[in-house]
Image (cartoon, rainbow, N blue to C red):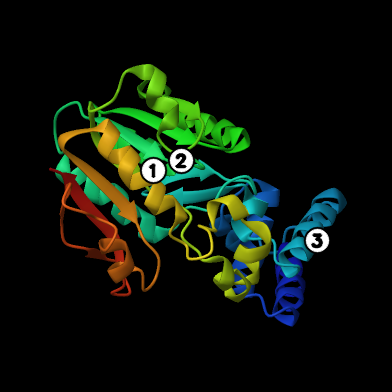
């Protein structure tokens, strides 16, 4: 079978399953199987595909039809211009989370800040910050050892491993043995914020494939925020900054969690005008 024939057939299969961007998905998966970029498909559209490559490609198309996210099938996702390994053990990095990184970079344009990334997952936040902020020292925590293995590989891929310490455990508690109380300049987190009742309404790709632990934040979606704020107070130095991503329609509820110990700053909206990033300074 020729390249253009395989793309047409795969696109039809994906369209039958109502997969968005069927043609693009088919092209990206075939390019991946061939070890080429998409431009190669255009210039070699009459080229024959080997039987083994075609078999593997068809298997991936069937996985995509069943809802497996494209990023997991490719094993990668771009974030702030960097390529990250992703598997079903980690949340797929999203464009709105780049705003969290940008907010941190704006507050620490120079110097050697100590920064914690809570719930690091793929490590995209910690690695992106370390890549852009050469003097930063980061501590990245996660409950999942499987996720931390991915994060460590991503740090190594982008040559920032020496400046990120990966720690397994709950929120900021893994930092206890490191004598970091009131020594952090910044705490970053994109915590699980989906309410349990809202999980069935999520897209099938998200609901059935991405790690539940990285998605669901308890009955109301607020569990991690409620536990993280007092821990952040404990580890941030006076004037230190907490920067968190929040979910849709959570602005009023989240701001209500901050007491007089904090100086709450303005919310930052995402590309759709939804309040997405909250930043607060420890008094």
Closer to the observer: label 3 or label 2? 2
Label 2 residue SS: loop
Q: Which residue is mark 3?
A: 58
- In the picture, the quarter occupied by the N terminus is bottom right
Cα–Cα gap, marks 2 and 1: 7 Å
Is residue 190 in view? Answer: no
Q: Residues within 10 Å of mark 3 (few under 14, many from 20)?
A: some
In the displayed structure, does residue 78 sit left or right of residue 98? right
Earlier sequence position, callout 2 versus callout 1: 2
Foreground of the two, 254 or 110: 254
Q: Residue at x 35, y 40 (%)?
A: 128
Relative image position of residue 186 (x, y in whole percent):
25, 38
Q: Residue at x 68, y 58 (%)?
A: 30
Q: Which residue is mark 1?
A: 125
The reply to whether dot 2 and dot 1 touch (C-beta < 8 Å) is yes
**Farthest front residue?**
260
Relative image position of residue 102 (x, y in whole percent):
25, 50
Earlier sequence position, callout 3 versus callout 2: 3
Which of the 4 image quarters holds residue 29?
bottom right
Q: Is residue 10 above or below residue 73?
A: below
Q: Residue at x 24, y 55 (%)?
A: 258
Foreground of the two, 215 or 235: 235
Cα–Cα gap, marks 3 and 2: 33 Å
Relative image position of residue 7 (x, y in whole percent):
70, 68
Q: Is residue 181 above or below residue 52?
A: above
Q: Is residue 76 above or below residue 138?
A: below
Which of the 4 image quarters holds residue 130?
top left
Foreground of the two, 70 or 47: 70
Relative image position of residue 162 (x, y in whole percent):
39, 19
Q: Residues within 10 Å of mark 2 (few under 14, many from 20)?
A: many
Please tell me the numbered disc located at residue 120. Answer: 2
Foreground of the two, 247 or 121: 247
């Amino acid at each position: 079978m020729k390249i253009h024939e395989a793309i047409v057939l795969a696109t039809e299969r994906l369209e039958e399953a109502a997969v968005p961007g069927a043609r693009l998905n088919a092209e990206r998966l075939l390019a991946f199987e061939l070890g080429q970029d998409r431009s190669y498909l255009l210039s070699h559209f009459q080229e024959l595909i080997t039987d083994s490559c075609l078999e593997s490609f068809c298997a991936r198309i069937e996985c995509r039809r069943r809802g497996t996210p494209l990023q997991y099938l490719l094993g990668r996702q771009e974030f702030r211009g960097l390529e990250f390994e992703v598997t079903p053990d980690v949340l797929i990095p999203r464009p709105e989370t780049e705003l969290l990184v940008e907010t941190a970079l704006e507050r620490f344009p120079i110097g050697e800040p100590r920064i914690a990334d809570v719930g690091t997952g793929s490590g995209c936040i910690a690695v992106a910050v370390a890549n852009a902020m050469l003097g930063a020292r980061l501590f990245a925590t996660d409950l999942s050892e499987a996720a931390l293995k991915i994060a460590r590989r991503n740090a190594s891929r982008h040559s920032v491993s020496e400046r990120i310490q990966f720690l397994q455990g709950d929120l900021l508690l893994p930092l206890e043995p490191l004598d970091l109380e009131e020594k952090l300049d910044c705490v970053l987190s994109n915590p699980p914020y989906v309410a349990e009742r809202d999980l069935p309404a999520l897209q099938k790709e998200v609901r059935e494939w991405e790690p539940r632990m990285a998605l669901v934040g308890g009955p109301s979606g607020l569990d991690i925020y409620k536990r993280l704020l007092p821990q952040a107070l404990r580890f941030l130095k006076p004037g230190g900054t907490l920067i968190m991503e929040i979910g849709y329609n959570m602005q009023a509820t989240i701001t209500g969690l901050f007491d007089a110990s904090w100086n709450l700053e303005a919310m930052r909206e995402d590309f759709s005008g939804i309040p997405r990033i909250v930043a607060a300074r420890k008094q």
